[in-house]
Image (cartoon, rainbow, N blue to C red):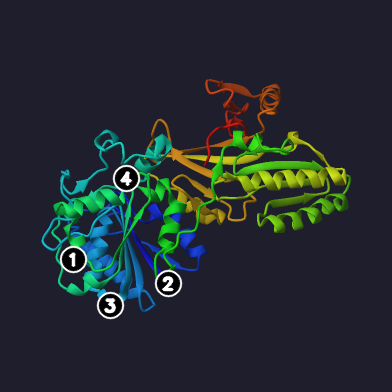
């Protein structure tokens, strides 16, 4: 089914970069919209009205080949998709409103914002409540501000115009994020003005998704699961999420001494006498993985076998990873393959971009990668280096810079740094050691050698 995704203020289609692939993987067709005036910071927003945004969603509904679509509106986008549903009530199977409310006829889309001329820029973070910013973190705030585009003033202050009461019959799912379902229902019962349109809707499902105001960035996989659980996409049941554990908890598990936690999972390398010797380990891993229902990435070479656990696209670890790792190590010992953690290295590419550049779509397309979260792009088959995008400091318009991130085991990192320095490198910054060291090559290319992943208490 077609799922039309409309983000709130300061966001375009980029906001759904991790949610959309999850919906597509489930067999649906996500359509993330970038509404008029939201293409870039340089777009002309002086004549953009609320009706322009509503008409853009209606046009997406009309272009969809199926009989019905799902409309997903986040924050201010909730009022916009509600108006689009009013225009095409027979084409909308369900409305999913995330951290936002259906705007009633005759009301402005939003209250409480003061645009600057034709624009409403993203405010300072201090202007938001702590609950809004929950789970976003400094990295998320930096990335969001780098990608944010001012919203058109005419949209924010525009008056909602609704005409067809059949919209009240469309099933609605209200997803509570920085507030709870209990909060929302109490506001409705108390007659709070912004939420009174809920009282006119005949079929409302309420779902809690505890996080901040931007779950596309802070809880994208959980948000995708919520969307996929809503009828007619699902039966309303949300499958339990895989519980993540920290690197420290992984290393505390029994039988995982051969393994190291680097970027994107737990890794091990087992030395073999020959290709056929290594292939025997691969053959032994397959039935173990099938019995556990948990499958690793395996790279067979004449020198040995690389094995990496895989629970989540973001590299988060689970108890199943530890159980699988211990089973693989037992099989390796029985076959006489020795672990060699010194062979473990995971490479990443960090791309720093200027304030007027949004380069992730280019790199994602050029590499054939998938976007991940707000800042990364990854090989969908997990073979090649991941790419991390972040603002250039200090900002320089029209300029960019790259450096290499090297993730190595904690017990190997100091030797790796020493080797790089002995080979002509220069220590540029050790203020974050022993988490990571920043080095430069003799011709001044930057490298970060990091070991923080290997004993971190963070659970992704």
Q: Residue at x 68, y 46 (%)?
A: 323
Count every numbered label the image shows and give the total: 4
Q: Measure the alpha-carbon separation of dots 3 and 1.
A: 18 Å
Q: Are marks 2 and 4 in contact (CB under 8 Å)?
A: no
The secondary structure type at the circle numbered 4 is: loop
| 33 and 412: which is toward the camera | 412
Q: Which residue is mark 4?
A: 178
Residue receiving disc 1: 200
Mark whose residue sits in front, 3 or 1? 1
Residue labelled with disc 3? 90
In this view, 351 is above or below 449:
below
Q: Which residue is mark 2?
A: 1
Which of label 1 and label 2 is nearer to you?
A: 1
In 3D space, how far apart are the residues under numbered discs 1 and 4 (Cα atoms)? 24 Å
Image side of residue 132 versus residue 278, left or right: left
Identify the element where label 2 is drawn.
loop
């Amino acid at each position: 089914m077609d799922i039309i995704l409309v983000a709130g203020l300061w966001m375009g289609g980029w906001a759904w970069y991790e949610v959309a692939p999850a919906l597509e993987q489930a067999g649906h067709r996500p359509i993330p919209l970038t509404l008029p005036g939201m293409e870039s910071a340089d777009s002309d927003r002086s004549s953009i009205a609320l009706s322009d945004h509503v008409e853009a969603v209606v046009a997406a509904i009309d272009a969809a080949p199926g009989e019905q679509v799902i409309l997903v509106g986040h924050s201010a986008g909730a009022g916009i998709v509600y108006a689009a549903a009013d225009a095409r009530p027979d084409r909308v199977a369900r409305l999913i409103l995330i951290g936002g409310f259906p705007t009633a006829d005759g009301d402005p889309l939003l209250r409480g914002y003061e645009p600057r001329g034709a624009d409403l820029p993203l405010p300072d973070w201090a202007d938001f409540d702590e609950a809004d910013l929950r789970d976003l973190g400094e990295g998320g705030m930096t990335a969001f501000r780098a990608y944010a585009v001012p919203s058109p003033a005419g949209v924010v202050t525009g008056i909602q115009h609704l005409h067809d009461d059949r919209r009240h019959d469309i099933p609605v799912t209200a997803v509570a994020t920085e507030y709870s379902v209990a909060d929302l229902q109490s506001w409705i019962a108390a007659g709070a003005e912004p939420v009174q349109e809920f009282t006119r809707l005949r079929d409302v499902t309420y779902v809690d998704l505890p996080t901040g105001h931007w779950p596309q960035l802070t809880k994208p996989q959980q948000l995708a699961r919520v969307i996929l659980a809503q009828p007619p996409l699902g039966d309303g049941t949300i499958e339990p999420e895989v519980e993540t554990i920290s690197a420290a908890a992984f290393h505390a598990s029994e039988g995982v001494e051969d393994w190291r936690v680097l970027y994107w999972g737990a890794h091990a390398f087992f030395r073999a006498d020959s290709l056929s010797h290594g292939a025997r380990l691969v053959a032994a891993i397959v039935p173990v993985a099938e019995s556990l229902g948990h499958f690793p990435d395996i790279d067979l070479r004449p020198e040995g076998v690389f094995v990496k656990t895989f629970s989540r696209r973001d590299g988060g670890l689970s108890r199943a990873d530890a159980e699988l790792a211990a089973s693989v190590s037992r099989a390796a010992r029985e076959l006489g393959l020795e672990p060699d953690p010194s062979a473990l290295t995971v490479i990443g590419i960090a791309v720093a971009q200027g304030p007027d550049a949004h380069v992730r779509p280019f790199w994602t397309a050029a590499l054939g990668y998938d976007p991940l979260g707000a800042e990364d792009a990854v090989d969908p088959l997990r073979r090649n280096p991941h790419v991390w995008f972040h603002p250039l400091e200090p900002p320089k318009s029209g300029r960019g810079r790259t450096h290499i991130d090297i993730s190595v085991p904690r017990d190997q990192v100091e030797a790796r740094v020493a080797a790089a320095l002995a080979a002509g490198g220069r220590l540029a910054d050790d203020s974050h050691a022993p988490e990571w060291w920043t080095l430069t090559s003799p011709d001044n290319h930057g490298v970060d050698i990091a070991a923080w992943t290997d004993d971190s208490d963070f659970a992704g």
